[in-house]
Each structure stands twice: as structure tokens, then as C-alpha cells.
Image (tube, grey):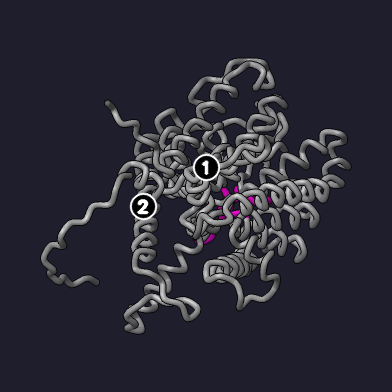
Amino acid sequence: MAVKKRLSTFQTILLGFAGLVLLGAFLLMLPISSADGIVTPFDEAIFTAASASCVTGLVIHDTATYWSYFGQAIILILIQIGGLGVVTMAALFSILSGRKISLMQRSTMQEALSAHQIGGIVKLTRFILIATGIIEFTGALLMMPSFVSRFGARGIWMSFFHSISAFCNAGFDVMGTKDQQYQSLTSFAGDPLINITVMLLIIIGGIGFLTWSDVRTNKFKFNRYTLQSKIVLLMAAFLIVLPAVYFFFAEYSGEPVGRRILLSFFQSVTTRTAGFNTGDFGSMRGSSLGLTMALMLIGGSTGSTAGGMKTTTLAVLIANGLSVFTRKEDTQLFGRRIDSSVVRNAATIFMMYITLFFAGAVAISFIEGLSFQKCLFETASAVGTVGLSVGITPGLGIISRLILVVLMFLGRVGGLTIIFSAFSGPARNFSKPPLEKITVG
């Protein structure tokens, strides 16, 4: 009698995202999804669906002018599901239907949210869903005066679209016109209300659901936060302020001081997986593009709507380096010892992101005959699920687009999820091979 094999939690997450992308692609292919009532080719539809589901924001068609309201609604639903996670949204339907959530489902929810324990996972999921609705609705209300005053009744739809897109760190916008496509939020570069609201939505969505819960429980008593929350908050502050100072002095020198401050902080916030822009990245100096690529690869925090290798990964690698420099036996942060398995995972994630980022750029540059630096920017944006672009994505061929789709998918699902889903199974104990030392560095 054949034994039915259950999917592991990692395989469930992987297949859930893959199914979401395919379903989205088929819906976007429908004539009703395009503004001109035409059938969108599968390769173009799946690129858009992957970008929305993986909350990236890279596009080959201007969202506002190519897609109908139905198509834009499909994209927004994909963004919402992709931002919160397929498993979290599935849990929502179970909660609403009153069905009992099994232990297997709870385990999958734990992995999807990167929670440390399975206890209280349903309560945490319910809190995340309610808080998300409140935050996105508030963001839409704050932006509505600016959008409605400029676009009339359409501004209501634009307010909700951009609020959800910003909170989910997606970077999709519906600002384009027939005469000026792919403009993102550049026309609002001097609007404090839009800039500050979008930045707050990006930051809140990017710090992670577990950090929200920690802040809710312990309020402003920083010393009571978990080690992960302390790392997340300090790294977020560090990665927002320092790049903003750099952008202030290196770019936008011809702008008034107030507008220059908004531009600098917005670019610093958006580069870590959000994808909106209020300035022209194509006109930036090389050093600024290099910093932007580094920020895109770092991304947001674990268990958040953001992508990238995560701020906690960077913090662990820095702490490990400091422990080597100071000749400490263990990696330490805030007076706590970091397990060696966490350090190994961080090093593996870093290696995977750098490999995907570099290999993807080499392949696209070779296939398309484009500048290697521009290709590096697009692959960093894809694998970091950011969505910023120097303008080459719409003109790429099918193979290059497929490379970006793979990078977006791996960047959102996570490299370790791919590995663990492929090699899931019971742990095996083998005797250790003989030890022999080698010299590195």
C-alpha cells in the first residue's frame, strides 16, 4: 500500500506562491484586464503577476495606462496576498469560516511568519490581519486629499492602491499617463503629505510582524524587546538615516532645502524593497547607484512584507566579523550569544543573493548587449524585490525577462525556503569526517 507523502511547510509556501503567480498570469491575460481589451501575451502576463505577487514592482507595461481597472484590481490583490503571504491569507479564510486550524497549518503559519514558536500563532495572525487593514485604510485616508484634489473621484482608487502597494513594499503605481508613462511618484516629490505617508507605510510594512507584536506588548520599553526586535529597529534607523545624509549631499544639489530633504529620505527608504521613486535614478552618479544596489540587496526585516536578504542577516554577519576581529569565541549582539547555525544560515543567504545578483546581471548583459552596471541594477532590484529601474526592463527579451521572474520569485520566497523544500525529509545522523585545518584570508 502506497504511503501518502505530506508536503513540508517549506514546500507548501513554495507551491502556494507559484500557484498565485500562475493564477494571476491567467487572469491578466484576459481581454478585460487590459485597457484596450486585448489578450496580453503569457510571457508579459506572468512577468507582471510575478512582480505583483513577489511585491517587486518591476514592470514591462505602465500599470496606469496598459491595464484596465479590472487588471489593476487583480494586480492589487496579488500585491496584498504576496505582501502578507499566501499562508497568512489562507489562514484568514479559515478564521472567517470558523474552521479549526490544524497543527500542520499552525506549523506552516509559523514558518511563513518566521515566528519563534508555534504557540499563539493564530492570535498573532489575527493581529497582523486586523492591523494591516487599519494601517492601509489610514494611509489611504491620509493621501486622499492630495489625490482627489488633483484627479477627482479617481483619486479615491489611487489612494487605496498606493497605500496597499506602499505597505506591502510593492512599488506599483497608477500615476502614468499616455504622454508620460512610468513616472511613479515623481510629480509628488515636493508634497510632504504624500512623501511622509508613503515612507511611513513602507517602514511599518518593512520592520516585520513580530516586531509589531513586540512593540505592542512592551510599548517604548526598548530593554524589554526581544533581540530580534532590537536588531530590526536599530538597523532600520541606521539604514534610513545614513543613506539619506549621503543622498542629501551627493544628489539633488539644485533643489530647495525642503524638497531636497524629502527626496533624500524618500530615496533612502524606498531603496530597501519599496520600489517607488520621486527622483530620477537614471541621472544619479555611479556611487549613488552603487549604494542603492547595496540597500536593495539588504532589503527589509525578517517576517515582513519586504524582500532582500534582510537586515537581521546583515547584523549577524557584522557581529560575526566583529567577533573574529576581537577574538571572541562566540558571535554576540546586545550581550546575547548567537547560535552558530544562525551564523551559517546568514552566510548562506548572503552567498546566494550575491550569486543570483551577479550571475543574473552577467546573463542579461551577455544576452541583451547592455551595460553591465545597468543590468546589475535591474537584477539587484529583482532579487531584492524592490522594483526600481534604470529603464531597461520594458525592452528586455523573453529570456532576460524570465531570468528576472526567477530572481523575483527566489527573492520573495527566500533562498533557504527553496533549499529546505527541495531537501526536506527526516534528519540523518552521520559520523563526522576527520578534521583538517585550512588557512583562509
Seen at 16% across and 70% down, the residue is: 438
Which residue position is annotated with label 2?
A: 352
Between circles 1 and 2, the one closer to the viewer is 1
Crowd around label 1: few <14 · some 14–19 · many ≥20 (10 Å)? few
Rounded to the nearest whole Å, what is the CA distance between mark 1 and mark 2? 33 Å
- Residue 55 visible in the shown view: no
Q: Quadrant of the N terminus?
A: top left
Position of 131 with respect to 124 (left or right) is right
Q: Is residue 90 magenta?
A: no
Seen at 59% across and 24% down, the residue is: 28
Position of 65 with respect to 429 (left or right) is right
Chain part drawn in magenta: 270-288
| Closer to us: 371 or 433 | 433
| Closer to us: 205 or 377 | 205
Q: Is residue 281 magenta?
A: yes
Position of 141 with respect to 381 (left or right) is right
User: Residue 354: which numbered mark, if any?
Assistant: none
Magenta stretch prevailing secondary structure: loop
Which residue position is annotated with label 1?
A: 102
| Closer to us: 195 or 218 | 218
Residue 390 % position (x, y): 54, 45
Seen at 32% across and 80% down, the residue is: 329
Q: Quadrant of the C terminus?
A: bottom left
Identity of the amino acid at label 2? Answer: Met
User: Hey, which residue is sitting farthest front in the picture?
Assistant: 1
Residue 158 % position (x, y): 77, 38
Q: Secondary structure at mark 2?
A: helix
Examine the image and state in which quarter residue 66 appears.
top right
